[in-house]
């Protein structure tokens, strides 16, 4: 994979929010970075709504996200915004491809079983599946199906995935050790994030993915899926996270970072855009600016290396 900084001159980037709540400061920080990475090189910027679970992602939140992005001046280039909840048939087609290649097996483990004390964990606390159901016999599978409907897991080989992140540099992951076999379809039939996001990026022709560094390790199984499903993999740039003064990640439930709250504080988005651009290392100080005015200034190499602490009353300093 090429270095992000040497990417094709007209990349295709995307922002793919999950409408499980209102956007917060960290979401629009990521959206601005993704928009600048694509548009500063005369590329395209696509919007996609990741509402895999409609019960958790009501349409009202998706509509609010679209309104907030319009207010911020982060225009997208696709006239129709795809929603994952409407793409089940597409995911089904690729799921069958993996099944036909004998890369998928049923998993009957409960959430409690997956979190037992002796289960292996990744460095970020994520449970690495131990392969409990991988070698069940047909008789055992039939017996367990009488008790509960299974999820579907993808077999990940004991092999390395290497790539160069546009911000954090060379990365190496061992699929079996760092991830284990991953769920690609839940027991209720809903397709899982890792499969859906890979298919969507592949079909939409996405060539660069800009997102938070909490998803850095997810690049490994996604790159495996890109290759296995016959897609060209995008280049990745992972951003340092915005965190609170006590070191916690920003959450949608916090009023002070809610975009709805912020829109009430400012008559226009320019102070907020300028603040985010400063956090991204693109301005020497936070000052009002339109998103479009940042395009000739943008340089991905200026993005800070460490997570960024956000003061509790940061919006007061922008007025």
Image (tube, rainbow, N blue to C red):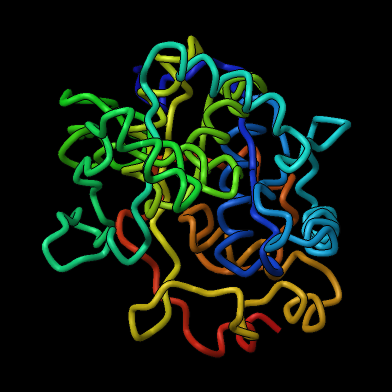
Q: Please tell me which residue is depicted at 59% across the width and 83% down the height of the picture.
A: 254
Q: Quadrant of the C terminus?
A: bottom right
Quarter assignment of residue 275: bottom right
Q: Taking the image as drawn, is residue 198 in sight?
A: yes
Residue 239 drawn above or below residue 221: below
Along the viewing direction, whichever of 167 and 59 lies nearer the viewer: 59
- Give residue 37's position: percent from left, percent from top: 56, 36
Q: Is residue 59 left or right of residue 94?
A: right
Q: At 79% from the left edge and 62% from the top edge, which residue is drawn? A: 58
Q: What residue sits 64% from the left and 63% below the top?
A: 274
In percent of width and height, residue 166 lies at 37, 34
Q: Let me know if residue 170 appears in the view.
A: no
Is the N terminus in the top left, top right, bottom left or bottom right quadrant?
top left
Q: Is residue 220 above or below residue 251?
A: above
Q: Count of labels shown?
A: 0
Outermost residue to the left: 118
Seen in the image, is 123 located left or right of residue 190? left
Nearer the observer, 294 or 139: 139
The residue under the point 85% across, 57% down is 63
Task: Looking at the picture, tell me which residue is in the foreground, 44 or 216.
Answer: 216
Find residue 203 and report its horizontal and vertical position in percent. 64, 19
Q: Nearer the viewer, residue 84 or 142?
A: 142
x, y (%) of residue 229? 48, 14
């Amino acid at each position: 994979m090429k270095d992000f900084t040497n990417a094709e001159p007209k990349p295709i980037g995307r922002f793919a929010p999950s409408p499980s709540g209102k956007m917060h400061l960290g979401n629009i920080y990521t959206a601005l970075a993704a928009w600048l990475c694509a548009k500063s090189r005369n590329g395209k910027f696509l919007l996609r709504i990741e509402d895999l679970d409609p019960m958790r992602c009501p349409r009202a939140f998706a509509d609010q996200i679209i309104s907030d992005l319009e207010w911020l001046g982060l225009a997208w280039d696709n006239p129709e915004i795809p929603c994952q909840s409407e793409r089940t048939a597409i995911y089904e087609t690729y799921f069958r491809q993996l099944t036909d290649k004998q890369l998928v097996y049923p998993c009957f483990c409960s959430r409690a079983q997956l979190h037992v004390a002796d289960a292996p964990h990744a460095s970020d606390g994520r449970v690495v599946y131990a392969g409990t159901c991988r070698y069940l016999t047909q008789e055992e599978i039939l017996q367990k199906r009488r008790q509960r409907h299974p999820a579907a897991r993808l077999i990940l080989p004991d092999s390395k995935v290497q790539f160069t992140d546009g911000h954090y540099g060379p990365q190496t992951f061992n699929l079996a050790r760092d991830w284990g076999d991953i769920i690609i379809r839940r027991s209720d039939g809903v397709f899982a994030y890792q499969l859906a996001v890979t298919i969507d990026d592949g079909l939409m022709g996405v060539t660069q993915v800009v997102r938070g560094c909490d998803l850095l390790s997810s690049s490994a199984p996604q790159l495996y899926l890109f290759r296995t499903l016959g897609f060209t993999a995008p280049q990745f740039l992972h951003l340092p996270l915005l965190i609170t003064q006590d070191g916690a990640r920003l959450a949608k439930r916090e009023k002070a970072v809610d975009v709805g709250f912020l829109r009430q504080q400012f008559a226009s988005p320019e102070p907020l855009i300028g603040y985010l651009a400063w956090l991204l290392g693109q301005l020497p100080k936070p000052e009002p600016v339109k998103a479009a005015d940042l395009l000739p200034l943008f340089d991905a190499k200026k993005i800070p290396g460490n997570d960024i602490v956000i003061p509790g009353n940061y919006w007061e300093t922008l007025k």
